[in-house]
């Protein structure tokens, strides 16, 4: 019986990988060598960050991904929706370093009305555009509810967070600018910021990719990493991605 050579074994393994990835692609799925949550957790370790301030937590997917990627520090997750928050609270309840807050985050404390989408995670304080609902059927708004709202500055004070050793992650479906406004002068104290960046208007009045990148540059941050996110399945055009920004003086050397 012939024994496969080392080269033959490698070719068989590569053929198997191609077949497996082809099967995933047919289902609009993929596997990546370095998943973005692992990149974020690695960056936080490199920057020696002990806290993740998770604005727009939904049911806790981001915090869970950080934990699965090796982050052991403090997580403070904010979620306003009455149907999503109990799931977040339950997920955080078994973790003594994970705090769940039932609140929206914006420009100033008070109350605000939020639009609830059919898929929950597309919910936003801002009106949704046709570009979003057409690219993601089922994301249309189904109701609205009044929710409490706080600010990043208030959370820093109330939770005794030092932004110099923290990541500010904002996933608020077009409301990122208002959340940054509510951080005030303390924005420039954060070591890192993660934002959703939209290439086209997905929510009325929302800042776009160039607006937010320039705002972060003006605040003293540079782009550390980008992750492709929401695309239009009809055309393949990317509509939204995640941007990870690091304060310029903390940016690791490239070599």
Image: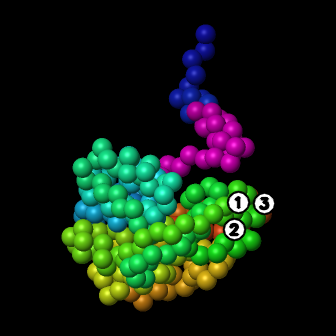
Distance of mark 2 from mark 3, alpha carbons? 12 Å
Q: What stretch is highlighted in magenta?
A: 13-35
Q: Residues within 10 Å of mark 2 (few under 14, many from 20)?
A: many
Residue 77 figure quarter:
bottom left
Local secondary structure at mark 3? loop
**Colour scheme shown:** rainbow
Q: How crowded is mark 1: few (under 14 residues within 10 Å), some or many (20 or more)?
A: some
Local secondary structure at mark 1? loop
Q: Name the residue under label 1.
A: 136
Whether residue 215 sits left or right of residue 72 in the image: it is right
Q: Position of residue 166 (x, y in %)?
A: 29, 69
Residue at the (46%, 53%) spot, across then down: 59
Q: Mark 2, mark 3: which one is toward the viewer?
A: 2
Residue at the (24%, 75%) spot, across then down: 157
| Figure check: 44 above or below 201 | above
Quadrant in which the C terminus appears: bottom left
> Of the numbered discs in the image, which one, if any, rests on residue 132?
2
| Figure check: 12 above or below 245 | above
Q: Position of residue 244 (x, y in %)?
A: 44, 69
Q: Mark 1, mark 3: which one is toward the viewer?
A: 1
Is 16 magenta? The answer is yes
Type of secondary structure dominating the magenta stretch: helix
Residue 249 figure quarter:
bottom left
Distance of mark 2 from mark 1, alpha carbons? 6 Å
Residue at the (38%, 46%) spot, across then down: 90
């Amino acid at each position: 019986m012939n024994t496969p050579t080392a080269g033959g074994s490698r070719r068989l393994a590569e053929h198997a990988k191609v077949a497996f990835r082809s099967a995933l692609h047919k289902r609009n799925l993929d596997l990546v060598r370095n998943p973005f949550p692992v990149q974020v957790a690695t960056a936080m370790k490199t920057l020696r960050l002990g806290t993740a301030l998770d604005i727009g937590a939904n049911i806790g997917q981001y915090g869970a991904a950080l934990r699965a990627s090796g982050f052991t520090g403090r997580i403070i997750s904010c979620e306003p929706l009455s149907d999503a928050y109990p799931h977040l609270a339950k997920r955080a309840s078994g973790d003594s370093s994970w705090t769940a807050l039932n609140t929206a985050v914006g420009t100033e404390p008070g109350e605000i009305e939020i639009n609830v989408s059919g898929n929950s995670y597309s919910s936003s304080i801002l009106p949704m555009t046709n570009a979003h609902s057409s690219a993601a059927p089922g994301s249309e708004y189904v109701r609205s509810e009044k929710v409490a709202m706080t600010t990043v500055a208030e959370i820093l004070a109330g939770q005794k967070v030092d932004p110099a050793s923290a990541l500010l992650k904002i996933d608020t479906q077009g409301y990122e600018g208002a959340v940054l406004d509510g951080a005030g002068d303390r924005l420039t104290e954060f070591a890192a910021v993660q934002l959703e960046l939209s290439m086209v208007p997905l929510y009325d009045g929302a800042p776009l990719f160039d607006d937010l990148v320039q705002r972060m540059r003006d605040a003293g941050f540079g782009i550390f990493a980008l992750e492709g996110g929401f695309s239009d399945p009809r055309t393949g055009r990317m509509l939204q991605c995640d941007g990870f920004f690091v304060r310029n003086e903390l940016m690791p050397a490239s070599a």
